[in-house]
Amino acid sequence: MNVLRRADPGYEAARRDCVWNARVADRFPDLIVQAEREEDVVAAVALARDGGMKIGVRSGGHSWAGSHLRDGGLLLDVSRLAHYTLDTGARRATVQPGVRGSDLARALRAHDLFFPVGHCQGVAVGGYLLQGGFGWLSRMFGPACANVTAIDVVTADGELVHADEQDHPDLLWAARGAGPGFFGVVTRFHLRLHAWPRVAMNSIDLYPVELLDEVFTWAKEIGPAVARSMELMIFLQRPQPDQRVIAVTGPVLAGGEDEAREALAILETCPVRDRAMSASAAIPLDFADLVAASSLLFPDGNRFAADNMWTSAPAAALLPGLRRIADTLPPEPSHAMWMNWGPSPARPDMAYSVEDEVYIALYASWTDPADDDRHARWPGDRMREMQDLATGIQLADENLGARPARFLSDVHLQRLDEIRARYDPEGRFHSWMGRP
């Protein structure tokens, strides 16, 4: 393993490389440890224990807020742990935390297998699975963490253990939803796989912002009727300084073309569709195209800020906040996203415990550091204005250090704290930002 101290050459490059967001926070760990093997993880935890240091863990670094990057202590970079194995007959896989979701999807496709990986290219599975995993076909297969059957994890006392429903079940329970507050280092996830969806298809309708009330009211009303194979999303964007548009899109991953077309037909029920600026119906796609499209919304090298909310509030209550979001929207590629999510089916018993009918997320994206003050507060300010309508947030698109919010149920958070007290009594691992 490679150990970098603050005075060492290469420290600052390694610190910045640990955060994908170009807006890297001014937080400086005392040590950065780059692990190459599981044994390095065990050694790093022992090093932190002997030195009385807290530990932050980075796998892919896509946390918008850089929650793994803290002042002092040890930052453990496990991005180089990127091995996976496939058992195609049993529909099982094991993946290390540094494996990129897009690489896993590509490997699975060769065997007609699927896992609900993240929407964005380059996201590693480590943090993604711990925080829940809001990915492709998650409306059908559940959040990605619901498909984790076991983990191999280095605990705060430096022991590498296997946790499943029989052995250390509380660790498995906690790992499925604790996110950056998890109190261990997962070195391997054991996954349940699914059949590859043979057809990818999408429709895209573009509306002027003047139809915002009608479009979002319709979207809220049809929520329960949206096929589980579809991700009905509405994007608010600002392609020109004086222009704001609404894009209604419904990518479908289905077993056949008829199924996909039937799911997409719901977009034609929008009462103002005849006033759309453009409409492209039932476009055949390749899954790789859907994943690659994320780079248009989240370009490498940009500066980002994000925030989000789950809600079941009536459309009439949400519309004032949505209008305010549209009125204050920064230029592209900044955007707001609405996704029809629930009603959700029963979930396995796990820490992940907050979701609702609709997910709203805001992403500010810009390139010039001089614009930080102008754009960085936008997502949090808008979500703060609507927080009385929220039932919680999703770990991933959040900044808990700037705006603490509910991401687990009260009962689940209490249980998680009890498990933490047993496995990490000295608080070796950092908790969530904004919480001691």
Image (spheres, rainbow, N blue to C red):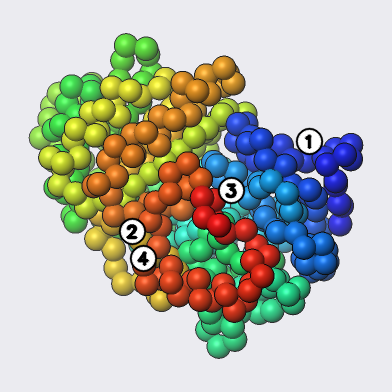
Q: Quadrant of the C terminus?
A: bottom right
Instruction: Identify the residue position indicated by label 3 in the image.
Output: 67
Q: Which of the marked residues, 4 or 1, is nearer the chain's N terminus?
A: 1
Residue lying at 68% horizontally and 73% vertically, measured from the top left:
155
Q: What amino acid type is highlighted by mark number 4?
A: Ser
Identify the disc placed on residue 409.
Answer: 4
Q: Residues within 10 Å of mark 1 (few under 14, many from 20)?
A: few
In the rendered image, residue 108, in percent from the top left (x then y), is placed at: 57, 60
Say left or right for 408 vs 322.
Answer: right
Q: CA distance from mark 1 to mark 3?
A: 18 Å
Tag in front: 4 or 2: 4
Q: What amino acid type is highlighted by mark number 3?
A: Ser
> Is any part of residue 24 visible from this angle?
yes
Identify the disc placed on residue 13.
Answer: 1
Q: Are marks 4 and 2 in contact (CB under 8 Å)?
A: no
Tag in front: 4 or 1: 4
Instruction: Identify the residue position indicated by label 2 in the image.
Output: 355
Q: CA distance from mark 4 to mark 1?
A: 38 Å
Q: In the image as oriented, which residue stretches furthest toward the top?
A: 242
Judged from the image, the secondary structure of the residue bearing numbered disc 1 is helix
Q: Are marks 1 and 3 in contact (CB under 8 Å)?
A: no
Say left or right for 41 vs 111.
Answer: right
Q: Which of the marked residues, 4 or 3, is nearer the chain's N terminus?
A: 3
Q: What amino acid type is highlighted by mark number 1?
A: Ala
Q: Residues within 10 Å of mark 2 (few under 14, many from 20)?
A: many
Q: What amino acid type is highlighted by mark number 2?
A: Glu
